[in-house]
Amino acid sequence: MAQVSQKIRISVGLGACGIAAGAQKTLSALEEAIAARALDVDLSITGCMGMCYREPLVEVRAPGKPGVVYMEILPERVPRLLDEAVAKGQLIQEWVATGDDGGGSEQAFLARQKRIVLRNCGHINPEEIDEYLAAGGYQALRKVLSGMSREQVIEEVKRSGLRGRGGAGFPTGQKWEFCAKAPGTEKYIICNADEGDPGAFMDRSVLESDPHSVLEGMVIAGYAIGSNHGYIYCRAEYPIAIHRLNIAIAQAEKKGYLGERILGKDFSFHITIKEGAGAFVCGEETALMASIEGKRGMPRLRPPFPAISGLWKKPTNINNVETFANVPWIITNGGAAYAAMGTEKSKGTKVFALAGKVRRGGLVEVPMGMTLRQVVEEVGGGILGGRKLKGVQMGGPSGGCIPESLADTPIDYDSITKTGAIMGSGGMVVIDDSTCMVDVARFFLDFTQKESCGKCTFCRVGTRRMLEILQRITEGQGREGDIETLEALAKNIKRGSLCGLGQTAPNPVLTTIRYFRDEYEAHIKEKRCPAKACRKLITYRVIAEKCPGCGVCLKVCPVKAIRGDKKVPHVIDPAICTRCGLCMDKCKLKAIEII
C-alpha cells in the first residue's frame, strides 16, 4: 500500500479535456517554478475531474486535509498559485472551483452527483497502481478469490440490478450467467471501449482517469464466467487512454492482479488491447468481434448470441467500460447497496457526457431517477447565454431528441425509451432555442449514413435517401409529402437492418418529427427556418438606426457583400452574402440581425 505523503500535493488534471485546454503547459510551468523556488512538494497528475468547462484544473492538497481545486490555471497563474496557495497556505478565493470547506464557485456541479464509476477520477494518478490500491483498489478481487464461488459472484451482480451501460440495458448478472452456463472451457471477456457517439466521452475519461477499475471489473467477470482471457476494444483515436491502459496492465501483472495464478490462486487471466480504426459500426458487438478476429467489422445475424458463440465461435461476454467499472464497487459494498440507489427497474447511477448549450459541461454521474431538467439546471447550471431549453439529445446517433415539455422525465431505461429516445451509452447534448431541429436530425443522419458498413440495403440506401430529403428541406427545397416519406423510410430501415446501427439510425428523425413537426412544416411550406439557423433560409440585414457606419463589418466580410460610406449605415447585399455570420459576430453594437 502507498504511504501517505507528508508533503503538499499538487495534482494537474491531465485528461484529454485538460490537455486540450492547455494543462500540459501548466504542468511544465509548475515543474519549472517549483524547481526555481526549491519547494518541497509532490507534483503529480490525475485524470478528468469532471469540470471540463473549467480546465485546466489543479488541486492543492495539504497533508491530512481535503484538497482545494483551482480552476483555469494557465501558466501565467502558476506563480501566484505557488506563492500564495502553496507556500503560504492561503486560499485564492476567486480561483477556487471546489474548496476544503465545501465552498467554491463550482460546488453546485458536484452537489447532486453520486460518484461510483467516477469515484477515483480526478483523485488518483492513473499511472500509479499504488494510488489505486490506497483508494481500495483490487480489494474486490481479493474478496472474490478468497472465498466467493463463481455462482456467488454472479448472484451478487444480479442482486445489484446492474444493467449494461452500453445502451441496451440488458441485466449484467443475467448476461454473465448465460455465458457461465454455456458449454465449453474456452471463453472470452470483451470490454467494449469503442465509444463513437458525437458528444460522448464517458468511456474515454474513465479509461484515462481510472483504468484499474475497469481491469479489476474484467478480471472479476472472467472469474465469474470461467474465462482466462479478455480483450479491450478501444478506438485508436484515444491514444491517452490506450497509453494508460498499457501502463495499468503492466503494473497489474507485476503486482499479481493479472496474469498467471492471480494472488496465488488457481485462476489466471490475461488482457489484450485491440485498437479499433474508428468505425462506428464496431460498437455493435458482432462487428466488434469480427474486427478482433482480423475481419472487416460487419455485423452478423443473431442467434447464436455471443454468450453461446462469440469470439472465434467461443462463448463470449461483452460489456462496456462503465459496466465493468461498477463491478468492484458492487462486490466491495454489496449488491444491495447498489440496488438501494436508482429506480425500481434501473438501479445505481449513470455517467453522462453533458455537452451542448449548457453552462457547466463535463463528466457527470447521477443517480438513476433524477430528471433531465434537474441534470441540465442543477448539475449543468442551466442554458448558456440565458436562452431557453429546447430539448435534450439522448443516446447519440442511435437516440432521439426529447423536447423541453418532457424534461421532467426521470432518467431510467424505461422512461427514456417511452419518449422515443434511448439511454444509450451516456451522451447528453443540451439544445437551446437557437438550434434548428431539422438540422439536428440531418447532422445525426449524416453521421450514421457515413458510418453504415453497407451490408444491409435498407441501411445503406435508405439512410442515404433520408439524408437527401433532409438536406433539401434545410436548403429550402422541401416538398409536400417529404415528412411522410421520411416516416415510411424510417419504418422500413428499422425493420430491414441487421444491427443496431440501422435499426436505430432513424430515431433522431422520428423524434424530431414527433415533437417538432411544426419546424419541418415551416421549412417545407413557408421556406423558413424558425430557429434562424439554416443558411439557405436566412438573410442578414443591417439595422440602420443602430449602425454608426464604423466599417468593422465591412472589413471582416470575406466576399465584400457589405458596402457603405464611413459614418453612414451600411447595407448587406443578399445576392453576394454567404451567410457566414462574421459580420454579426464582430458587431459590438448588435446592429446586424437575421431575418
Image: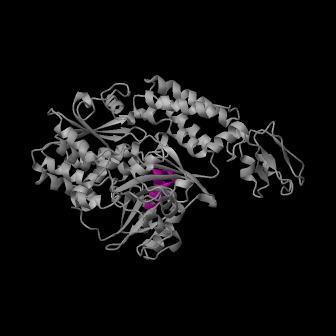
Which of 21/293 is in front?
Answer: 293
Would residue 45 be seen by someone viewing this image from the given angle?
Answer: yes
Which of 166/4 is in front?
Answer: 166
In-image side of 264 versus 231 (left or right):
left
For the magenta stretch, what is the residue range?
15-30
From the viewer's perspective, is residue 10 above or below residue 295? Answer: below
In-image side of 496 versus 250 (left or right):
right
Q: Which residue is depicted at the point 54% across and 30% down?
A: 488
Q: Which residue is depicted at the point 27% across and 46% down?
A: 172
Position of residue 414 measured from the top left corner of the image (x, y, whole percent): 40, 49
Position of residue 231 measured from the top left corner of the image (x, y, whole percent): 28, 38
Residue 16 among those drawn in magenta: yes
Residue 28 sits in quarter: bottom left
Position of residue 145 measured from the top left corner of the image (x, y, whole percent): 13, 51
Q: How is the image coloured?
A: one colour
Residue 437 sits in quarter: top right
Which of 257/6 is in front?
Answer: 257
Position of residue 10 measured from the top left corner of the image (x, y, whole percent): 39, 65
Q: Which is the main secondary structure of the residues drawn in magenta?
A: helix
Q: Which residue is depicted at the point 22% across and 33% down?
A: 315
Would residue 279 be seen by someone viewing this image from the given angle?
Answer: no
Residue 533 among those drawn in magenta: no
Which of 108/213 is in front?
Answer: 108
